[in-house]
Image (cartoon, helix red, strand yellow):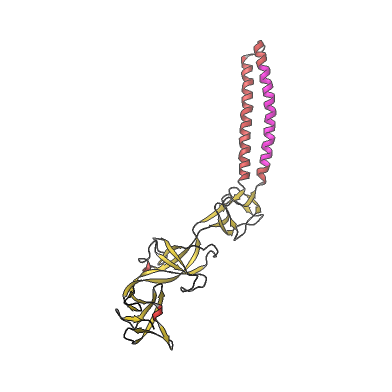
């Protein structure tokens, strides 16, 4: 954009620069996971609060249902009764086989004893399966974090009654993005992979807290005349979800004259540059860029500048 004529001379060139549009973006999680209750019951224990950092699989709450405990006790009693019947059926079957060998019992009576034994065995297996279902339902009362991240919202308190499928907590995944909205006239300039400049909290573009980001996604659907895009940048974990941050994104290219800042000097608040022939020219400064300072007026292409 600026070529050197001599060691201390620079030729002003008109070049194409990327125009930046300043907008405010909101810190948003890439994914939001809902921790839901799989059974109905009462919140017996709540282990997290808004803002808590959780890991995947961590216990968030416990939903208790007294009917499940009573059902398990009832099934235990039923299985115990069936085991007593099984013991009696085994003794009856053993005796029937002995009597059949001696010819004192008919085959029909032996078949009935075998059938009674098999029925009791099947009933014990069915009761055990029903008990396993109740135990599993009770275990599903423990609500686990579906993903690692930060708890944004807890919808319940201890003692509340919840229904199956009810959301207990909302968790933001650990990765965050900046979601911005631009007027639709800028939609044609914004592309996935474009660079973006991200400011810090209350920082201007020239401050040291400025970071570089990348446009990771541009959504194809306009919302109320605005194009929605996501910008990825490192170091958003300590920001509040929903916090607004200033972002500069590409908004097209335009011709501009850029000179190094070292060629400018001020006098009485007015910016000047010195030409090769020693003439001082008052110029109007524009925005600063990584290459230097944009000159809005006062210079022409191919002017040779020297340092003051």
Camera-nearest residue between 104 and 48? 48
Indicate whether 231 appears above or below 142.
below
Q: Nearer the viewer, residue 168 or 109?
A: 168
Up the image or down, 108 lies above or below 187; here it is: above
Specify start and end residues of the magenta stretch as a single range. Answer: 70-96
Q: Residue 303's spot in the image, x, y percent? A: 31, 81
**Residue 71 lies in the magenta-colored region:** yes
Outermost residue toward the front in this view:
7
Residue 257 percent across, percent down from the top left: 34, 77
Question: Viewer-proximal residue, 140 or 290?
Answer: 290
Residue at x 42% of width, y 66% of height? 196
Residue 265, above or below 256: below
Q: Is 183 covered by the magenta stretch?
A: no
Taking 8 as reference, is 69 left or right? right
Secondary structure character of the magenta stretch overall: helix
Q: Quadrant of the C terminus?
A: bottom left
Q: Position of residue 215 (x, y in %)?
A: 42, 63
Identity of the residue drawn at 32% across and 80% down: 304
- How many labels sit on residues? 0
**Above or below, 132 relative to 302:** above
């Amino acid at each position: 954009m600026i070529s050197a004529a001599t060691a201390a001379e620079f030729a002003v060139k008109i070049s194409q620069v990327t125009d930046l549009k300043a907008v405010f973006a909101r810190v948003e999680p890439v994914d939001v996971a809902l921790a839901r209750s799989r059974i109905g019951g009462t919140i017996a224990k709540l282990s997290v609060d808004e803002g808590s950092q959780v890991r995947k699989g961590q216990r968030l709450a416990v939903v208790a249902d007294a009917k499940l405990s009573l059902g398990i006790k009832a099934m235990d009693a039923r299985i115990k009764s069936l085991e007593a019947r099984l013991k009696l059926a085994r003794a009856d079957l053993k005796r029937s086989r002995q009597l059949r060998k001696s010819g004192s019992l008919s085959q029909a009576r032996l078949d009935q004893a075998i059938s009674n034994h098999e029925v009791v065995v099947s009933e014990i297996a069915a009761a055990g399966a029903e008990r396993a279902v109740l135990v599993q339902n009770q275990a599903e009362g423990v609500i686990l974090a579906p993903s690692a991240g930060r708890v944004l919202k807890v919808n319940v308190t201890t003692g509340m009654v919840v229904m199956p499928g009810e959301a207990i907590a909302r968790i933001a995944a650990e990765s965050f993005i900046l979601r911005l909205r631009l007027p639709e006239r800028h939609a044609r300039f914004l592309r996935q992979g474009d660079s973006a400049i991200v400011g810090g909290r209350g920082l201007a573009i020239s401050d040291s807290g400025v970071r570089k980001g990348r446009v990771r996604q541009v959504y194809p659907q306009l919302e109320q005349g605005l194009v929605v895009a996501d910008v990825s940048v490192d170091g958003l974990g300590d920001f509040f979800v929903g916090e607004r941050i200033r972002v500069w994104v590409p908004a097209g290219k335009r011709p501009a004259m850029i000179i190094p800042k070292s060629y400018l000097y001020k006098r009485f608040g007015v910016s000047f540059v010195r030409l090769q022939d020693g003439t001082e020219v008052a110029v109007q400064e524009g925005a600063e860029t990584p290459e230097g300072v944009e000159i809005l007026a006062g210079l022409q292409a191919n002017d040779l500048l020297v340092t003051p």
